[in-house]
Image (spheres, grey):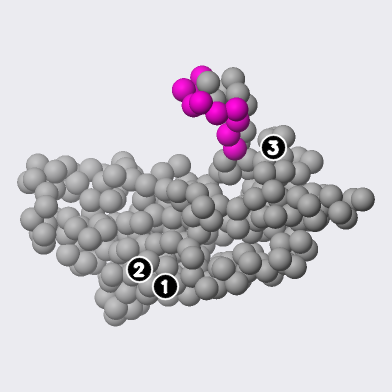
């Protein structure tokens, strides 16, 4: 992505939200040393440190940070908001299609594999959690947050629609895993959007039942957690269906 604006020498702080020393620190930090929290200051949401022409220089660097994944949950709202808020400016600069492709590419990159982390009772106790066990899917929270941001900021909500449609129509095991995980996560703190395009798939009992044996055959045997898939099937109302099929 080639930005037609140079690296800014000053940040105008259009909302008068930053101390001068923080603005100076942002400008003094080399590109390859910028951290996710600095990108949030530069891009927003809502109160970015610079005007569009000043902050857009840092957008490709923020996308690269997103793809690395470690700080994706903390950064994704900033990037999604910036690309939504300044969509017309990005279009004028010939960057909008590439930015949309970058968001779509991040979602594809984050769903390249499906890994469940399992904490048993002892591991939960070590973290101070009063739980018998806890499971989470790597990058699920960042994906849910990005999808909800696309829905909330509206300008690129079609990317969320296309993403869930791709998962819903795929028989590839990793995609099946992600589809069922998103369907399961509807009541989580980080959850997929409630928009109609998602609910239409999540409430399709025939589709859920179709995907369950794929997960059973290709994902469950290699998943490190002994509890995750049974919990998913129970949450989605598939436990009884599975028992009847095996009877």
Left or right: residue 32 compared with residue 208: left
Question: Given the current orientation, which residue lies at the most extreme right position?
Answer: 247
Chief SS of the magenta region: loop
SS state under label 2: helix
Q: Name the residue under label 3.
A: 227
Tell which circle, 3 or 2, labels the residue nearer the N-terminal end.
2
Q: Mark 1 points at which residue?
A: 156
Tag 2 near tag 1, CB within 8 Å = yes
| Rendering coords of residue 59 (x, y %) | 32, 59
User: Where is 245 relative to 123, above or below?
Assistant: below
For the point 69% across and 37% down, the residue is: 227
Left or right: residue 219 compared with residue 46: right
| Rendering coords of residue 240 (x, y %) | 78, 52
| Rendering coords of residue 234 (x, y %) | 69, 48
Instruction: Tell me, for residue 153, which label it has, or none.
Output: 2
- The span from disc 2 to disc 1 (Cα, nearest Å) is 7 Å
Q: Magenta region: which residues?
A: 126-135
């Amino acid at each position: 992505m080639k930005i037609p604006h140079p690296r800014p020498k000053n940040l105008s702080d259009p909302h008068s939200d930053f101390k001068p020393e923080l603005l100076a620190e942002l400008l003094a930090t080399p590109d390859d040393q910028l951290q996710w929290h600095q990108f949030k200051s530069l891009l927003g949401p809502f109160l970015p440190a610079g005007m569009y022409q000043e902050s857009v220089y840092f957008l490709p660097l923020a996308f690269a940070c997103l793809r690395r994944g470690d700080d994706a949950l903390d950064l994704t709202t900033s990037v999604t908001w910036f690309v939504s808020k300044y969509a017309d400016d990005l279009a004028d600069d010939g960057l909008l299609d590439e930015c949309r492709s970058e968001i779509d590419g991040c979602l594809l990159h984050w769903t390249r594999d499906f890994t469940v982390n399992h904490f048993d009772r002892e591991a939960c106790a070590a973290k101070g959690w009063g739980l018998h066990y806890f499971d989470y899917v790597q990058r699920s929270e960042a994906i849910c947050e990005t999808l909800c941001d696309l829905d909330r900021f509206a300008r690129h909500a079609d990317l969320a629609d296309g993403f869930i449609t791709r998962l819903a129509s795929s028989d590839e095991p990793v995609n099946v895993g992600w589809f069922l995980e998103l369907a399961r996560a509807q009541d989580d703190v980080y959850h997929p959007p409630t928009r109609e395009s998602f609910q239409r798939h999540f409430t399709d009992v025939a589709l859920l039942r179709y995907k369950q044996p794929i997960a059973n055959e290709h994902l469950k045997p290699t998943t490190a957690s002994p509890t995750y898939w049974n919990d998913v099937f129970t949450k989605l109302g598939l436990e009884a269906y599975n028992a009847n099929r095996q009877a």
